[in-house]
Each structure stands twice: as C-alpha cells, then as structure tokens.
Amino acid sequence: MVGPVAILILVLASLAIGSFLNVVIHRLPRGESLAFPGSRCTSCGKAIRFYDNVPLFSYAVLGGRCRFCKEKISARYPLVEGLTAFIVLALFTVYGPTVAFAAYATLAFFLIPISFIDWDTGFIPDKLVIPASIAGIIFLAAFHIVKWQVTWKSGLFGMIAGGGLLVFLMTVGKFLMKKDAMGMGDVKMLAMTGIYVGFPAVWIALFFGGVAACVYIMIALIRKRLQLKNTIPFGPFIAIGTLTYLLAGDFLIQWYLGLIR
Ligand SMILES: [Zn+2]
C-alpha cells in the first residue's frame, strides 16, 4: 500500500520539479545557464529569497507580485508547478509505484517544458528532445521485462513510426498547402514519444493530439484569436495527445469501439 506520507512527498517533489521546469522554460530559449544565477525577478532583477520561492505557496502569499518592485509575476509560474504535480499524481493513480510510472513521469518532465517553449517561440529544442530520447532508450533497454507493455521492439518501432508518419504528413501538407505546416522539431518530438509509448500507441497519441489541435483551432477561429493563414505550434498538442493516451487511452478506445458497435 502507498501511504499518505508517500503521496505528500510525491506532490512536494513534483511541485519542486515544476518550479525547476519554469526555469528551463524561461532560460533555455535564451541560452542562459539553468543552474546560475539563482532565481531572479524578471522585472527588477533582484534575487528571489528562498522563502519567496516555495512553489504555489509563495505566489499566493505575495499576491502574485514581486516583493521588491511589486511587478506582477506571471500566473504561468504557479500554473506550471500545479500542472506538473497534477500530471505526476494522475500518472501515479493509473500506474502505481512501477517502472512504467517512473518512465512516463520522466517523459512528462520533458513534454511540459517542450510544450511551453514551442508555444512561446515556435521552436522545439534538441537540448530537451535528445536527453528525453536517451532516457527513454535506457528505460527500454533496462526495464522492458518489467510490468510495462512497451517492449524494446515496440519502442524502437514506435520511434520510427512516429517520426516517419509525421514526415509523411509534412510532405503531403507541404504539397497541398504550398507551405510548411510542421517542422522537424515536431518529427523529433513524436519520435521521442514513440520510444516511450511504442507502436501503435504513438499513432493513437498523435490522433488524440490532432483532435485537440482541431478543437483549439475551431475555438480560436470563432473567438477571432487566429486566422486561417496562421500556423500554430504543434508540440503542445503532441504532449496533450501523449498524456491523454497514457492517462485515458484504454478508456477512450473502448468508448470509441462501443460507439461503432
Ligand atoms: Zn521585482
């Protein structure tokens, strides 16, 4: 049995990791060091004291403003912290204390910063995709026998099938629309995901992501936040599709098959 203390440690640890992911999201695209200097107010540059750097809690205590210059702190900081803890808890609820949980939580710790960086900059950094892929291959090589449906064959095929399908869709898209709809960053990101979820799951994850992207585009068009000629970053939707598959894939597939029958 997993006791409440273990759950509490899990939540606190994932909030702390979420806090670090904020640093990655902010600094990695700027080419800044992730370790030094410590956290600073992005407005006045003053060092943030350790007691003002407690995930979620400090944001609430400070009323979402810097202690020194009173400038608003982006609501994204507590959002990323809370989101990280929520995803880790949800994965733990589904997979329990298993190797699969460790692998998928590791994947989530890369999907989150990749998504926000792609959303901000339209760029998916190799500096995140490559380490995540290596970690996935290590999980595959070391633990494929443990309670985890992804075998090394399925993982390697997932990588190739994930990247390959996107290359194909990109080529078709470019032919039909005469412009690039996706980039190589998306291809590498889906290949990375394929290592973790295997085949054919990587295609199901891509399908879920595509559905999420369509819903987003329709809402954004209706609310006039987007025009048809715009492109949107696809990385966040690959992440949404992958996490949807990992958390509710079996349920959604059964439900869909039930509709057909
Ligand atoms: Zn400040």
Image: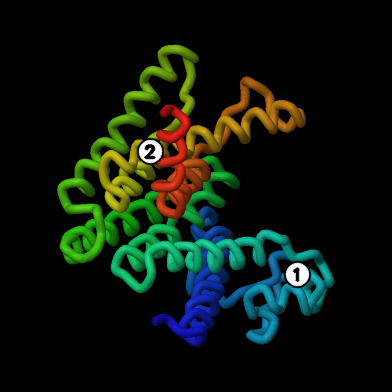
Q: Quadrant of the N terminus?
A: bottom left
Res. 44 mark: 1
Q: Is residue 108 left or right of residue 122?
A: left
Q: Residue at x 58, y 60 (%)?
A: 26
Residue 93: % across, % down: 46, 66
**Sequence-earlier tag: 2 or 1:** 1
**What color scheme is it?**
rainbow
Quarter of the displayed picture in which ligand 1 can be seen: bottom right
Residue 163: % across, % down: 31, 36
Figure label count: 2
Type of amino acid under label 2 = Ile
Q: Tell me if residue 66 can be seen.
A: yes
Q: Residue at x 37, y 52 (%)?
A: 129
- Which residue is identified by label 2? 204
Q: Residue at x 81, y 72 (%)?
A: 63
Mark-to-mark CA distance, 2 and 1: 46 Å
Q: Along the line of sight, which residue is nearer the eye, 116 or 79? A: 79
Q: Is residue 11 left or right of residue 163?
A: right
Residue extending farthest to the front is: 261
Residue 6: % across, % down: 46, 83
Above or below, 246 against 217 in this view is: below
Q: Along the line of sight, which residue is nearer the eye, 62 or 199? A: 199
Q: Is residue 219 left or right of residue 87?
A: right
Nearest-to-viewer mark from 2 and 1? 2
Q: How crowded is the residue under tag 1: few (<14 C-alpha within 10 Å), some, or many (20+)?
A: few
- Is the residue marked 1 within 8 Å of ligand 1, measured from its CB? yes
Above or below, 146 against 186 in this view is: below
